[in-house]
Amino acid sequence: MEQPSDTSFKFLSLGGSNEVGRSCHVLQFKGKTVMLDTGIHPAYQGLASLPFYDEFDLSKIDVLLISHFHLDHAASLPYVMKRTNFQGRVFMTHPTKAIYRWLLRDFVRVTSIGTTSSEKDENLYTDEDLADSFDKIETIDYHSTMDVNGIKFTAFHAGHVLGAAMFQIEIAGLRVLFTGDYSREMDRHLNSAEVPPLPSDVLIVESTFGTATHEPRLNREKKLTQLIHSTVGRGGRVLMPVFALGRAQELMLILDEYWSQHADELGSGQVPIYYASNLAKKCMSVYQTYVNMMNDDIRKKFRDSQTNPFIFKHISYLKNLDEFQDFGPSVMLASPGMLQNGLSRDLLEKWCPEDKNMVLITGYSVEGTMAKYIMLEPENIPSINNPDVSIPRRCQIEEISFAAHVDFQENIEFIEKISANNVILVHGESNPMGRLKSALLSNFSSLKGTENEVHVFNPRNCVEVDLEFKGIKVAKAVGNIVDEIQKEETSILKEETSVIKEETQDNIEETEEQLETGQSIKEEENTERIQEEGGDDIIVSGILVSDEKNFDLNLVSLSDLREHHSELSTTVLRERQSVQVNCKKELIYWHLCQMFGDITVISDDDNITNTTVKKEESSNGKLVLQIMGDLRLTVAESVASLEWTQGIISDTVADSIIAILMSVDSSPSSVKMSSKTCNHDHSGVTEEAKAQDEVSKIKSIARLFKEQFGECFTLLLNKDEDSKDSLKEDISGMITIGKNTARINFSQMKIEECNSNPLKGRVESILNLSSDLVSPLC
Ligand SMILES: [Zn+2]
Ligand SMILES: [Zn+2]
């Protein structure tokens, strides 16, 4: 398995793909590695029963999650923890851990029985390995989320057996749901599997029953009790090979109830029921302890009757067969479930020659085991202790499935509810798995070619599934931004808004600044679209802070950054640009006022702006303006310096201010302003010359208006332009912008009429400025 690229998600089964047994799957995304389950294959012995651990470098694994205590999911855990280079952390639920201990101790014992000294080396691990590994296993509660270096995972009820969990794993926004073995049927003691509240991108789902359908639960219970009743009725013995924990307890609940209902025929020891397992007592005490983790029904029974429902009236425990007095009809639940060895195998060999007896298979039988073989109703079976002896088989063989795995209908309904675009089938023999794949593909065929197309995979062991997940970005809104969002959606307030999921827009310009802590701020001033369920999008802007190590992505407003990410030193880029200006400051101010309404005078030593700003102590003819909020322009001694904080808007404004500063010199209306004021006496100037001067002054002002208002401005000149007397009254201008009009008397430099206040204000400010602007050259 190669180290995946940044966007590729890799799935690899080391066991449990196209087979039932030795479940073990590896997920890799964004440099994180998660392993799911470490089972053994019940049909094989020793090292051959292990998943293909040699095919993957186990030292890469960050987190190992164990779905439940069954041997095909958990039994090679001590091997992985003690005999390989695995160094990750291991998690399972509390009940799984409690049961795991007893179960695996028994597993070590059972598998080492009958092995010769050379075979002893094949033992996968010792009791000490088991004890050592046990202390390092961490527990996780249902519905709680753990975070290990950016790998977040949450446990959900899976039904199946006590403590069984489905895990939803989230890495960098990608969510994967692993069902483990799961059941959607509410039985007598367990909750059925849950649908996690958050969606998943990838679903890894069991396919044990393929496209087969279970008979309704009640029918199966009825069939079971009738079969057993009729067998013991004819004096026969019933052998029910069961796994020590899980279905055994469910079957006991059914039988104990039935025996109570038929106490006159079966009760009071007439037909005893035994639960034969090395672990019988220990297992039952675990079940008695964890009643609070079971379903409401059984918890209510526990509360109401004040007696533990797992303390059975009609069932006795047998630790081994020494104490068993086999005199007449009886019902025996015995482990192990696959009849490979141990108590159930001994009883099988003892009882199978008699035709009044019955072997009743209720669990899932793994390929290659005696439980699977016996269902073919063979003439003879091999003896476990003496392979040369074969034992005739005449007993009745029946199968009624109480295996707590989903059937086709339940599975497909669940898969639809999860609605992941990628479904990976595991935990199923090739044929049923293949049939399920075809059925799923045809079920989702209408989505083919759309963006919701469902891809179904049924990989073999050690064959990688490689999926590309580009641009999944989840950002959590933090601080003020949350208030902002809530304000926006006061009418449609919903809880989910703190989580945003959004596809990256490839065209977003990214500015990335590496910061001291190794974290980075990405996409400054980025705009995020929050998707509301069935509502309108809300657009908020802030800074995306990404923690590269843990994949946390927070959307924070700039003002909040220090509070929520004190570890970040923020870099604010101030830009500064200076240009040479030869014109008067008044002219610069005037041009800027025309371009940008929003100008604050910070300091104005020569009082050219007519604003009441305090003069600085050491007056040196400086003019300081604040433009469009952030930009600061300082003009002093023929140099204009502009300073601003980098940003898309500020940069643009700065560009246009610089452009104005550069062109202000060459603008025709500026020529006079930039000329030197004369110092000589004007007293000798003739009246005629004065009049001429007035005309040219008015023309200059009129030109300014033309520049400002373009086609909307008309200059109205008196026909007797040369007549000195009429001159003053008659030069006027007209501005017409839609319905708004203004008439200006240039001779008196005032507005004669105007029907719009904004227009009036604008005209007035131009008139005020122009009186200075057109001050006569000498
Ligand atoms: Zn299982
Ligand atoms: Zn399983």
Image: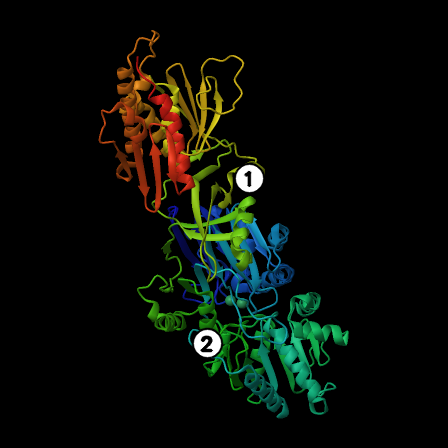
| Disc 2 Cβ-to-ligand 1 distance below 8 Å | no
Give the image location of residue 350, x and y in percent.
59, 80
- State whether label 1 is within 8 Å of ligand 1: no
Q: Which residue is mark 1?
A: 560
Residue 428 locus on image (x, y percent): 44, 69
Amino acid tagged 1: Asp
Instruction: Provide residue 578's location: percent of width, then percent of height.
Output: 37, 20
Q: Report whether 129 appears left or right of 16.
A: right
Where does the image place residue 182, in percent across and percent down from the top left?
A: 52, 68
- Give me the residue at 43% from left, 59% from top: 202
Question: In this rendering, is residue 488 above or below 763?
Answer: below
Residue under circle 2? 409
Q: Is residue 263 left or right of residue 176?
A: right
Image depth: mark 1 or mark 2 in front: 1
Residue type for callout 2: Gln
**Above or below, 64 relative to 267:** above
